[in-house]
Image (cartoon, rainbow, N blue to C red):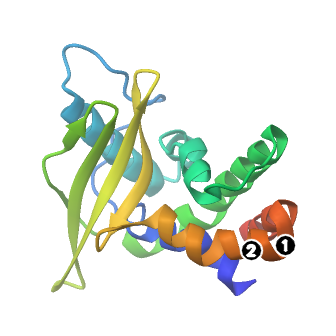
């Protein structure tokens, strides 16, 4: 069970746990000809950070592409549409109830540095870093995906590895093999409530 308490903490710790400035809008940044894709991706990340900082978890979650996260976490496992929806709901609940509060508690006052976004059609990567405890530089990257004219956070990269890959191979796949998809969903839901 402890494994699932850290399931998405690892997923989020490399990126969602860092705060900088806040912008408050109600919806993800829409693609427009006046604003470059680089600016749109960076804006989405900064909005996410601001929403977490100000405990606007529903708005923060709206900037995370939970569907893509879930798809990457499930991997090649064949599940029904209803099970996929249930899995996504469990992941969303975990992010809101566990990951965002941890992010707020530990990283509210840390400044984040952003590299210039690298955009490749419908995917983007924004390298970032923080100075932790004043001297330890921690580097990571935000991975974003464009969907229906807006940019969403869809993964994180640390030390050259995607967080969803790490969590899939270390947590989700072993749980699905042992507990099945329904059991895995139940464990995620239980971890989200504890």
Question: Which image quarter: residue 2?
Answer: bottom right
Vertical comparison of 50 with 19: above or below: above
Give coordinates of residue 22: x percent, y percent.
Answer: 33, 46
Q: Residues within 10 Å of mark 2 (few under 14, many from 20)?
A: some
Gap in angstroms between the C-alphas marked 2 and 1: 5 Å
In this rendering, position of residue 68 left or right of residue 189: left
**Mark 1, secondary structure of its residue:** helix
**Mark 2, secondary structure of its residue:** helix
Give coordinates of residue 139: x percent, y percent.
Answer: 23, 71
Give coordinates of residue 149: x percent, y percent.
Answer: 40, 21
Q: Nearer the viewer, residue 169 or 82?
A: 169
Q: Which residue is mark 1?
A: 179
Q: Which residue is mark 2?
A: 175
At 48% from the left edge and 29% from the top edge, which residue is drawn? 26
Q: Residues within 10 Å of mark 1 (few under 14, many from 20)?
A: some
Q: Quadrant of the C terminus?
A: bottom right
Is residue 78 visible in the rendered image? The answer is yes
Mark number displayed over residue 78? none
Count numbered badges in the picture: 2
Give coordinates of residue 190: x percent, y percent.
Answer: 81, 70
Q: Marks 2 and 1: CB-CB under 8 Å?
A: yes
In this rendering, position of residue 46 left or right of residue 164: left
Q: Nearer the viewer, residue 134 or 185?
A: 185
Q: Quadrant of the N terminus?
A: bottom right
Q: Residue furthest top?
A: 33
């Amino acid at each position: 069970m402890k494994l699932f308490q850290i399931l998405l903490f690892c997923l989020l710790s490399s990126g969602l746990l860092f705060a900088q400035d806040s912008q408050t809008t109600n919806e993800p940044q829409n693609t427009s000809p006046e604003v470059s894709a680089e600016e749109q991706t960076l804006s989405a990340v900064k909005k996410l950070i601001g929403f977490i900082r100000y405990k606007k978890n529903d708005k923060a979650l709206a900037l995370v592409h939970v569907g893509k996260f879930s798809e990457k976490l499930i991997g090649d496992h064949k599940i029904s549409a209803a099970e996929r929806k249930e899995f996504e709901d469990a992941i969303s609940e975990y992010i809101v109830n566990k990951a965002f509060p941890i992010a707020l508690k530990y990283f509210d006052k840390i400044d984040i540095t952003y590299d210039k976004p690298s955009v490749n059609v419908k995917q983007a990567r924004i390298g970032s870093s923080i100075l932790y405890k004043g001297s330890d530089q921690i580097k990571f990257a935000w991975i974003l995906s464009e969907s229906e004219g807006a940019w969403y956070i869809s993964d994180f990269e640390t030390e050259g590895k995607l967080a969803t890959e790490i969590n899939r191979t270390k947590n989700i796949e072993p749980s699905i093999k042992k507990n099945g998809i329904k059991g895995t969903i139940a464990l995620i839901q239980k971890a989200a409530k504890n």
